[in-house]
Structure formats: structure tokens, C-alpha cells
């Protein structure tokens, strides 16, 4: 997989950015990540350079992203595309099934097994992080698989980096990219998607179909649909720099 090509501000592109593991390093807990002021400055500069054609697409909720990226107010897709905020600032949510209360209680009880397990409640989905208790991975996978099998096809069990999530089926990061590209200022531009995790693969495939740039951050992964790679978060920030400081 070759290194990502240098971005050119003169080319009509639309940039879509994953958050954790792409813009910021993954922390032990989702609430412990650090967003440097220099990153906010870079994102705002790229957004302005592209006439607004920049969006953050994340598994986090839009409310969570807003708190972390304040005072920026960007186009965003949250909860893997279930939530969507357009360039005008209008937020929409895909119609989705609610996690049954009995299932929610079972997952909450599972999270109490170990204080190192972190339950992230996004409203429409529940993510259980085991980064602080890697020895619990087998238990978490077995129990969540059992819980998931009691649900209908309105839900999926989403894998991630040291996290498993039960969320509504349908929307994903690929459909989020597609939705943005259907409207200004993204329409008619070549898409660029940067992500680091299996949750980003739908977006990689969608961008590939549109002859865009799909960029995987982190260790080489021959199974990834991404066509290009960047080493780490620092490399992503450096890669964005030509758009933040065009000549």
C-alpha cells in the first residue's frame, strides 16, 4: 500500500476525517483523549481552504465531538452515520430501532464485571471498551455475541479497536460520505477519507467507487480496502498541512 499522495488545494476535493486514531491518539478511555489547540487551528484552516468541504465522520456522537472540538462547528456524521449535521448546521438522525431496555440492562450488568470495562452510551447504540482490561476480551465477545443473537436484523454487532458495539443497522460511514457528497459544498468534489479502524472500511469502499483517496492510518493491513496509508496521527496532521497553509 503506497503512502498517501500530497494533497493539492487547487484540486476540487472533499475531505472526510475519522476522529479517534486518526486526528487524535486513542486513549485508555474515550473521555481521556487530548485535542491540542494546534489541531483545531489546522482543521479550521483546511475547512476554510476547501470552502467548507470538510466533515468529521466518527463513531462518537455529534454532541461528544462538538464538546471535544469546541469552538469549531463542523459538518459531521456521528454514531457511524446515524447522526448527520450538514453545512447549514441542521442536524438529522436516521430512523433507527431503539435498543430494547432488557438488552440495555444486560450490557450494563456486563460492564460491571470489571472496573476496567468502559460502557459508552450513545443513545442509539452501546459500546463496551475493554482497552483497560484486555484479558476480558474473550468474555466480552462471547457475552455480547449471545446478547446480539437475541436481537433482530435491525441491529449489528460492530467490531473496533478494543471495543465492541451494538448499534442500529443501515447507516454506516460509507453512507455518511455518500450523503455529504450529494449536497454543496461537497458535491462534485473528489472525496478523501482518512480512517484507522474496521469501522472505516465502508467509507474506504465508497470512496474507492468514486475514484477518491482512501487512506488507512496505522499498521499495514493487507485486508483493508484503503488504497493509501499514513503511519500515525502525527503523519495525518502533517499530511493536512499543505491545505492548512496553501501557497
Image: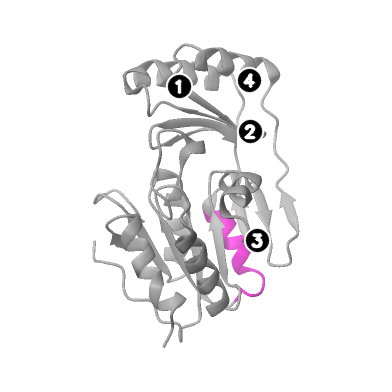
For marks 2 and 4 on the same chain, the one whose residue lies earlier in the sequence: 4
Mark 3 and 2 residues: CB-CB less than 8 Å, in contact?
Answer: no
Based on the picture, tell me whether residue 180 belongs to the magenta stretch.
yes
Name of the residue lying farthest toward the front: 37
In the image, which is nearer the foreground, mark 2 or mark 4? 4
Q: Secondary structure at mark 4?
A: helix
Q: CA distance from mark 4 to mark 3?
A: 31 Å
Q: CA distance from mark 3 to mark 2?
A: 31 Å
User: Magenta stretch?
Assistant: 174-187
Position of the C terminus, as image quadrant, is bottom left
Tag shown at residue 154: 2
**Discs 1, 4 touching: Cβ within 8 Å:** no
Q: Quadrant of residue 139?
A: top left
Whether residues under marks 1 and 3 lie with C-beta atoms below 8 angstroms apart, the answer is no
Please name which of the two marks, 3 or 2, marks the residue nearer to the observer. Answer: 3
Q: What residue does disc 1 label?
A: 117
Q: Is residue 23 left or right of residue 109?
A: left
Q: Which residue is mark 4?
A: 104
Q: Is residue 80 left or right of residue 208?
A: right
Q: Tell me the element at label 2.
A: loop
Rounded to the nearest whole Å, what is the CA distance between mark 2 and mark 4? Answer: 15 Å
Amino acid at each position: 500500500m503506497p503512502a498517501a499522495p500530497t494533497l493539492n488545494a487547487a484540486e476540487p476535493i472533499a475531505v472526510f476525517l475519522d476522529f479517534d486514531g486518526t486526528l487524535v491518539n486513542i486513549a485508555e478511555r474515550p473521555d481521556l483523549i487530548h485535542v491540542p489547540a494546534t489541531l483545531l487551528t489546522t482543521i479550521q484552516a483546511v475547512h476554510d481552504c476547501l470552502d467548507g468541504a470538510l466533515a468529521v465522520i466518527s463513531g462518537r456522537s455529534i454532541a461528544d465531538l462538538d464538546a471535544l472540538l469546541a469552538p469549531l462547528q463542523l459538518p459531521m456524521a456521528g454514531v457511524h452515520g446515524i447522526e448527520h449535521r450538514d453545512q447549514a448546521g441542521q442536524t438529522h438522525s436516521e430512523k433507527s430501532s431503539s435498543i430494547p431496555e432488557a438488552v440495555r440492562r444486560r450490557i450494563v450488568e456486563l460492564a460491571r464485571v470489571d472496573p476496567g470495562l468502559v460502557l459508552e452510551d450513545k443513545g442509539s447504540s452501546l459500546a463496551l471498551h475493554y482497552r483497560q482490561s484486555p484479558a476480558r476480551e474473550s468474555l466480552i465477545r462471547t457475552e455480547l455475541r449471545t446478547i446480539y443473537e437475541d436481537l433482530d436484523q435491525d441491529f449489528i454487532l460492530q467490531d473496533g479497536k478494543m471495543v465492541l458495539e451494538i448499534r442500529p443497522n443501515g447507516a454506516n460511514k460509507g453512507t455518511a460520505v455518500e450523503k455529504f457528497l450529494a449536497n454543496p459544498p461537497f458535491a462534485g468534489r473528489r472525496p478523501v477519507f482518512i480512517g484507522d479502524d474496521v469501522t472505516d472500511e465502508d467509507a474506504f469502499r465508497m470512496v474507492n467507487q468514486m475514484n477518491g483517496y482512501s487512506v488507512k492510518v496505522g499498521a499495514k493491513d493487507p485486508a483493508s480496502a484503503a488504497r493509501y496509508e499514513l503511519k500515525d496521527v502525527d503523519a495525518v496532521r502533517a499530511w493536512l498541512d499543505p491545505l492548512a497553509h496553501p501557497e
